[in-house]
Image: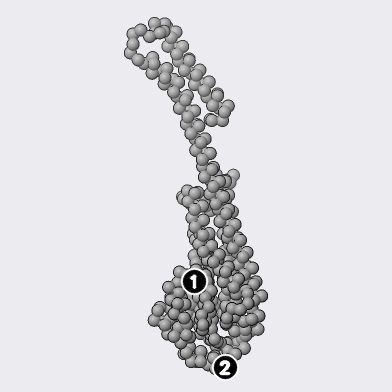
Amino acid sequence: MPAVIVDCAIYRDGRRTDGPADFSDALDEARAEGDAFLWIGLHEPTEKEFGLVSSEFGLHPLAVEDALTAHQRPKLEIYDDSLFVVLKPVEYEPESDTVSTGELMVFIGDSFVVTVRHGEGAPLAAVRQRLESEPEVLKHGPTAVLYAVSDEIVDHYIEVAGELQVDLEELEAEVFAPSGDDNGAPSSRFSATAKPTAELIYNFKRQVLEFRRASVPLAAPMARLAGAGVPFVHDHSQPFFRDVNDHLLHANEQVEGLDRLLSDILAAHLAQMGVRQNDDMRKISAWAAMAAVPTLVAGIYGMNFVHMPELGYVWAYPAVLGFMVTAVFGLHRMFKRRGWL
């Protein structure tokens, strides 16, 4: 399975060592030594491909089904022969304002770690290299791998939350100052888009919701790992997982704040639009009232009746015109003082 297996190695006393090319023989060798473990990384295996791995490592069928199906919530499951953890790494593309999530499943058991990755986000090569440069950490076995992977994903949550905060500040400036700066340039990159502001806010809120679906459900598994009594987890690893849990709580606080601020911005924008519509309606009503006076007078004197007042006077026509002009001017002054125009 060369295209599926990203990396496969045996670690003895925290250091990578050469082992058999076949992962089945490598697992037997790691179990025989006792202080070694095998770490195999897979990327989007098929059911047939993963079946070879699951049968050799004795993975639970329900966990295997979750690993193949993907689209799982972050969770922690304990089985007789392994520990199963689902993590959802998050990536943010500022140019398209899109939050994308992948999935990373970690199996921990007797002398082995199996990581199954779905999506292009959060490759584990950098995590593996960092761990291999820290043998004092890696010699704690599979627990060290779970900690390093969790720490990397949660720390990236904080980075993504910071990027979203920066873009949200730009969006907020666009909502409350849409006319741009003094030079006529757009106030933010959101000004260059043709989408309505309400649509921009709603799309941004959907991205924050996608972020929340990845980070918030992870709180319970991390809190459980930070406590004692979790099988296949080193007894002295609780402080490290508590640190990860603290970072996760910080990321969740940030994303909750983003969501609340977006709701406030959307409400403020809708209220702003309501005020603008009221102003427009008042202006329209004012102009309609000014147009109604001469229309009414002209309509009355446009009727074809012989006996109408002032038709026989020479000054009647200019007097009517003067009355219409005076009435319109008076209405204009009144609406102007009230701020309708």
What numbered label is drawn on residue 103? 1
Q: Nearer the viewer, residue 270 or 223?
A: 223
Q: Amino acid at mark 1?
A: Glu
What numbered label is drawn on residue 9? none
Q: CA distance from mark 2 to mark 1?
A: 32 Å
Query: Can residue 341 be seen in the rendering of this structure?
Result: yes
Q: Which residue is mark 2?
A: 33
* Residue 107 horizontal/vertical position (percent): 51, 80
* Residue 106 horizontal/vertical position (percent): 52, 77
Q: Which type of secondary structure does the marked residue at label 1 adopt?
A: strand
Q: Nearer the viewer, residue 30 or 276?
A: 30
Query: Can residue 134 be seen in the rendering of this structure?
Result: no
Q: Quadrant of the N terminus?
A: bottom left
Crowd rating for badge 2 (residues with CA inside 10 Å; few <14, some 14–19, many 20+): few
Residue at 49% x, 53% y is 202
Crowd rating for badge 1 (residues with CA inside 10 Å; few <14, some 14–19, many 20+): many
Q: Which type of secondary structure does the marked residue at label 2 adopt?
A: helix
* Residue 32 horizontal/vertical position (percent): 55, 94
Q: Nearer the viewer, residue 73 or 33?
A: 73
Residue at 54% x, 43% y is 271
Q: Amino acid at mark 2?
A: Glu
Numbered label tally: 2
